[in-house]
Amino acid sequence: MKKSINLWAFPYPERMNLEECLRLAKDAGFDGIELNYDLENDLSPKHGTKEFTAIRRMAERIGIAISGVCSFLYWPYPLTSNKEAERARGLELAQKMAQCAHDLGTENLLVVPGAVHMPWRADHEPTPNDVCDRRAREAVGRLVPLAEKLKVRLNMENIFFNGYLMTPQEMVTFVDGFQSEWVRVHFDTGNIMLFQFPEHWIPILGKRIQNVHLKEFTKKGSDHSLESFRPLLDGTTNWPAVMEAFAQTGYNGYLTFEYFHPYAHYPEALIHQTSDSLDRMLGRK
């Protein structure tokens, strides 16, 4: 298995530019870095193949792989929204992300296929479960031909607080329904920790797991927002059981640390500390 880190852990773009982040990740010993697509920065609709290819070449010069493309844009533009304009924009952005991933030289695109509820969006009207499922299948189905053409895998992410695909069996049924090698799973250990256990999901998802997010989740208190996620080895997750489950499935892809608070102070030390934690989990130390 290979070590990766999401760009959200870096003070980007406020204090560090993209090249500096890539160099720091490489210096800390990461094999890859996951980049995030948004509306404003280096990965955005403002840029295209020329710019993304330049980023790919920069990463190659530095000697670090781009492990995947991730995005928060599935929340303001959910593929299952009751607002047709949001659904249409979400699908358009997902198509742009697929092209971006291809241009960056990664085959991994994280996809949030749908949401029954988004408690952090006061303006979001909940989508009935059956409607959410139908719309999610329609949206991903429309993305599959492009994914096949670009050789980019659409990796469905499990998320406990959006009310959709809440069990590994549901995820298996959803993914297998497309009968396409380009629809897989992006498994997130922290996203189910409130009520479930990642070591139980991994054997059920098995070979469908294409990419992975690692993060801790604290079960203390009643805050179930992004503030609940913690750095690695915080004590909540049974990491030996999780790593053994990955080993038993034969997973050999990226393990990407995902954290939503940029390391604004001493980022170099904290990025190295995270790399060290992953080394210990992988048995390298």
Image (tube, rainbow, N blue to C red):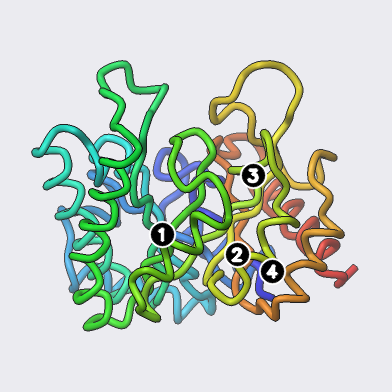
Query: Which of the two marks, 2 or 1, is nearer to us in this view?
Result: 1
Tell me how far mark 2 sits from mark 1, CA to CA.
15 Å
64 vs 167: above or below:
below
Closer to the observer: label 4 or label 1?
Answer: 1
Asked if marks 2 and 1 touch (Cβ < 8 Å), the reply is: no
Q: State yes or no: discs 4 and 2 in contact (Cβ < 8 Å).
A: no
Tag 3–tag 1 contact (CB < 8 Å): no
Disc 3 from disc 1: Cα separation: 15 Å
Q: Is residue 280 above or below residue 15?
A: below
Quadrant (top left, top right, bottom left, bottom right) of the N terminus: bottom right
* Residue at the disc numbered 2: 4
Q: Which residue is mark 1?
A: 110
Dot 1: element: strand
Residue 274 x/y as whole percent: 72, 53
Q: Earlier in the sequence, mark 3 or mark 2?
A: 2
Horizontal and vertical percent position of residue 104: 34, 73
Q: CA distance from mark 3 to mark 2?
A: 16 Å
> Circle 3: is it few (<14), some (14-19), or many (20+) Cα within 10 Å?
many
* Callout 4 touching callout 1 (CB < 8 Å): no
Disc number placed over residue 190 in the picture, else none: 3
What separation in Å lies between label 4 and label 2 (alpha carbons)?
Answer: 9 Å
The location of residue 46, given as percent across then percent down, is 15, 53
Q: In what element is the residue under mark 3?
A: helix
The residue at the point 71 percent across, 42 percent down is 216
First along the sequence among labels 2 and 1: 2
* Residue type, label 3: Gly
* Image coords of residue 102 (percent x, y): 29, 76
Q: Amino acid at mark 4?
A: Gly
As measured in the structure, the alpha-carbon distance from the residue carrying label 4 to the one carrying label 1 is 23 Å
